[in-house]
Amino acid sequence: MAEQCFRMKGTTLTSIVLDILNFEPDEFDKQLTAKVASAPQFFTRSSLILQLNTAISATEFELLVALCKKHQLQPMAVKGQVGELRTTINDLGLSDISQSKSTDSALPAGDNDAPAPAAAPANNGVAKVIDRPVRSGQQVYAQGGDLIIVAPVSEGAEILADGNIHVYGTMRGRALAGVKGDTQARIFCQQMEAELLSIAGRFVMQDTIQTQCWKQSAQAYLEEDALVVSALV
Amino acid sequence: MAKIIVVTSGKGGVGKTTSSAAIGTGLALQGHKTVVVDFDVGLRNLDLIMGCERRVVYDFVNVINKEASLNQALIKDKRTPGLFILPASQTRDKDALTMEGVQAVLNDLSKDFDYIICDSPAGIEQGAQMALYFADEAIVVTNPEVSSVRDSDRILGILQSKSMRAEQGKNVKEHLLLTRYNPHRVATAEMLSVADVEEILAVPLLGVIPESEAVLKASNQGSPVILDQESTAGQAYNDAVRRLLGEKVEHRFLEAQKKGFFKRLLGGK
Ligand SMILES: Nc1ncnc2c1ncn2[C@@H]1O[C@H](COP(=O)(O)OP(=O)(O)OP(=O)(O)O)[C@@H](O)[C@H]1O
Ligand SMILES: [Mg+2]
């Protein structure tokens, strides 16, 4: 009897949605360059969903995808005004998800162009507890609740939660709390050496964290839309 | 049922093959029937370090392709009783190993041996993933430098997510083997210390193998360095094998030796 070749599973993943408000190639390239430069580590090789809020032609769409790739962003799916573009989307190996359901949150912030976050989802009160190290290249997501990690998180690892994040161990990776827009979410770390901290789309990078409470017990939270990192005493 | 142990690292050239040969030999010396399997298809280093390159007729890929039986391909070590080598092919590429083929060979070996040591190729791609997929335990070989530690972290992540045991919701037991350790260069902060590496990787320490000229000498002679019990590296590998078998053995060769010979003989730090 032949051995089973595959298994199908469902998964939820968090990705960046790029809202295309109007597409003028040169201007788009310029703005994207600036955005990526603001947080290169955050955006590099991120997978991307393109949300077309304006009708564009097939040629423009191909250009749009090419420009994203030029900035190391990896479009994987398209939604919004997909209309005539179905064949082009197919030919480029992307998926048309204009019919699928999804919840968006605001990102990126740290500047003023981000729209207000979508309404905070209900916290289901169930925490996900991880007691093994989260290694470089791994990603852990606590959907609908808090994430508690009783082990170190390596550089190059990513942990995400709809609710709060607690790390009892050295935190060297990226932590994103309130990923569905919960501005009340916080991040607590026993030893803060994070690459990136993000709450409801607002984020700070390592160079900023280093000047604040590096290698100390610390928490991160939003105060009037700005992400604050402070030592826990 | 044999215990399958992969020797892996992510980064190349850190001492996987040297360690596979030494630890395989050490286990056999302790009376456990052991086979060391070379997964580095296309390079074939293990047989050189074990000094049996002239006796290779058939290899791992031949067995997978059913061009030879396992018994035809296995090489019995001339020095150490109970030690065997399954060499890699020099003429094929990495794709020559198939998951089903590897599984069948490991299953067969499992019936006869106590330990199967899998010498992994470098990298985190398919070849390395194949070598670790069936492992019960992993020896992660790391040099005391940032890039090596980072790659080890990567391979540990793969081990706990993409191995067969991980897919079954079980753990793969992890061991950290720090090799090419040079206390003098740690003292001058050119290298990470044992404590640094342990802290970053959070994996129990199996051993620290000092940088030693005896390693190169041993591999030129085709005789695993563990057989040279005069050398610090040989002694450190011997300690590591005893720890692997569950003994409590204190770590040695961690400090730069300034204290002189007698102090060392009398013990103490
Ligand atoms: N403790 C040591 N002291 C000095 N030299 C060492 C030590 N360990 C390994 N080496 C040297 O490092 C080199 C690489 O060793 P080895 O072939 O075992 O690494 P590897 O991880 O198997 O490499 P690859 O990734 O290419 O398979 C060899 O020249 C070996 O002699
Ligand atoms: Mg090797």
Image (tube, coloured by chain):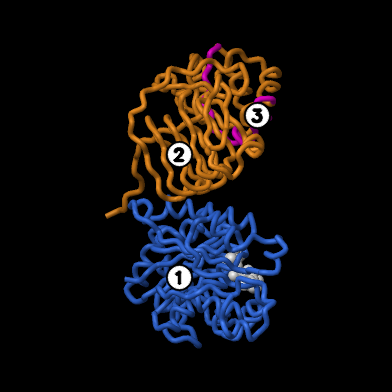
**Residue B30 location in percent, x, y?**
42, 82
Q: Which mark is residue A36?
A: 3
Q: Give the residue at x 62% y 73%.
A: B210
Image quadrant in which you'd find residue B190? bottom right
Circle 1/circle 3 CB separation < 8 Å: no
Q: Quadrant of residue B110?
A: bottom left
Q: Position of residue B57 (x, y in %)?
A: 50, 78
Question: Which of the chains is blue?
Answer: B
Q: Is residue A183 above or below residue B105?
A: above
What is the spatial separation of the Cα atoms under label 2 and label 3, in whole angstroms?
28 Å
Decide: few, some or many residues near mark 3? Use Cα within 10 Å; few <14, some 14-19, many ≥20: some
Name the tint of chain A in the rendering: orange
Q: Is residue B261 visible?
A: yes
Q: Is residue A159 left or right of residue A46?
A: left
Task: Specify whether residue A46 is painted magenta.
Answer: yes
For label 2, count other residues whose C-alpha is less than 10 Å away and answer few (under 14), some (14-19) or many (20+): many
> In the image, which is nearer the foreground, mark 1 or mark 3?
3
Residue B117 image label: 1
Q: Nearer the viewer, residue A1 or B44?
A: B44
Q: What segment carries the magenta color?
A: A34-54
In the rendered structure, which amino acid carries the disc numbered 2?
His
Find out whether the residues at labels 2 and 3 contact each other: C-beta distance under 8 Å: no
Q: Quadrant of residue B164?
A: bottom left
